Amino acid sequence: MVSSEFSDLPKDGVCKPFQKHVLFLSSLTDRVITDQVELDFSDVFGPVAVPSIEVNDDDSAIIEHEEESSELVYDDPAVILTRSHSLVGPSTCISQSLKLGKLTLHETEDSLEATEHVAGETIKEVDESNGNNVIIEESLEGENGLLTKIQGVSIEDFEILKVVGQGAFAKVYQVRKKGTSEIYAMKVMRKDKIMEKNHAEYMKAERNILTKIEHPFVVQLRYSFQTKYRLYLVLDFVNGGHLFFQLYHQGLFREDLARIYAAEIVSAVSHLHANGIMHRDLKPENILLDADGHVMLTDFGLAKQFESDTRSNSMCGTIEYMAPEIILGKGHDKAADWWSVGILLFEMLTGKPPFCGGNREKIQQKIIKDKIKLPAFLSSEAHSLLKMLLQKDATKRLGSGTRGSLEIRDHKWFKPINWRKLDAREVQPSFRPEVAGKHCVANFEKRWTDMPITVSPANSPNGGNPFKDFSYVRPAASFLQRNSPA
């Protein structure tokens, strides 16, 4: 999981040709944030000077006039500057009595910790491997069950260009495949850290899931391989920025633009569910925009394959986007993803998640207990969809019924969407990120792109190598088409 805490972002985020589709912030003030301060999100956003509607789960609505205002004015940036990291915790999460103070989560390491020992080190993976530690499987099951010879890859096949992200276990680099003009994103993960946190199964699941998914709004895995010390995933390089990055620069999105983004996210999540996969960490940082403005779902580090009649008991995800059933430890299924889609839509339309402010325990309490407050400036159709997606009872949540995602696609808010054209990428979002070619990194944080290309020293992982058969080369398109179901 890659951190998305912002620093040194340019103040001028306005893209004038699209002003009628994006509600821009009136100003972006400089803020100095220390690493020791945990922000109260209400201090970042300030009061929203519009009426809101408080929604109960029993279909009643109470109109609350918080302040009289005839127009929307945002004096401060409607953006969270410090955001929660993705978490993986114990299977038994919380008692039904809501004694949240006793909940212990095993949070992944802070990205600052992960970079403490980086200075002065250079990438020496080629030396580490010595040609012996690179494990390459050279066969792939093809037509009629036959094994087809494929050519494996190693770190020597790639030129490192830029750092574009960093998390607890991983750094993400922009790379070029030598001998070609192809640009990729290379996610490099330290085995010792993975083994230390007992997360080997999550890393293997991420690789395995990515090999099975092909969808127009999901980032594709092109190669995977390993050395003695590290795992490598080589993916499509999508350089329009995280959805969170664009939310910061552009402000909250108007409904016509948010509708297309939401529809593309629904299409991608529907495809995952149809293939027996829950994402479990849907949030703006894990949704990229490509150069054409389409969303691309990424980061499957917490994804899980599931059977239709089974539930997962893992405590995982990012606090602000976690479904109530995950926090309560009741067990969860794919309906938890639809809750996260509802949170994402709320954030796109209002500039912040519905449950935020205070520390982790307070946010959890709000998710479980608080009613949703829907801003009055949203359409009645948007109110209806948000209310149905953010239903605290997972069995009543939109998308959890027998019709699955069709319940969401058929909602009246999505009536303008032609789903066939959308899946063919023929529905063009009105906003396109400013991208100056496939090498462009302007939509990534400068704190990463200005970072020297270095790597922290890694210890030999304990407990042997659990990553057998990790290497992968994506088959050619013609091969995929021959083996795709009719």
Image (cartoon, rainbow, N blue to C red):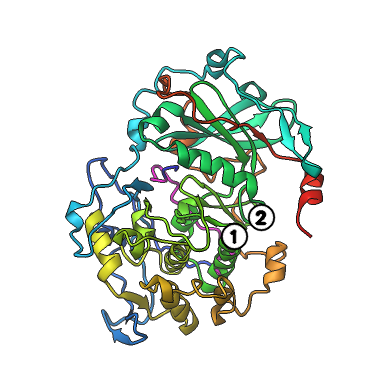
Q: Is residue 388 above or below residue 47?
A: below
**For residue 67, which quarter of the picture?**
bottom left
Q: Position of residue 333 (x, y in %)?
A: 45, 62
Tell me if residue 238 can be seen.
no
**Residue at position x 32%, y 81% in the image:** 56
User: At numbered mark 1, what does the secondary structure look like: helix, strand or loop?
Assistant: helix
Q: Amino acid type of disc 1? A: Ala
Residue 451 has which mark?
A: none
Q: Residue at x 66, y 55 (%)?
A: 215
Give the amino acid type for the residue marked by disc 2 in the picture: His
Mark 1, residue position: 268
Q: Nearer the viewer, residue 139 or 43?
A: 139
Q: Which residues are magenta?
A: 4-21
Mark seen at residue 215: 2
Tell me, yes or no, if residue 146 can be seen here.
yes
Q: Which image quadrant: the C terminus?
A: bottom right
Query: In the image shown, does 186 or 304 lie closer to the viewer?
Result: 304
Q: Residue at x 54, y 49 (%)?
A: 298
SS category of the residue bearing label 2: loop
Q: Is residue 96 magenta?
A: no
Q: Distance of mark 2 from mark 1, alpha carbons?
A: 7 Å
Q: State the residue in front, 332 or 237.
A: 332
Circles 2 and 1 in contact, beta carbons < 8 Å = yes
**Rendered location of residue 327, percent (x, y):** 31, 59
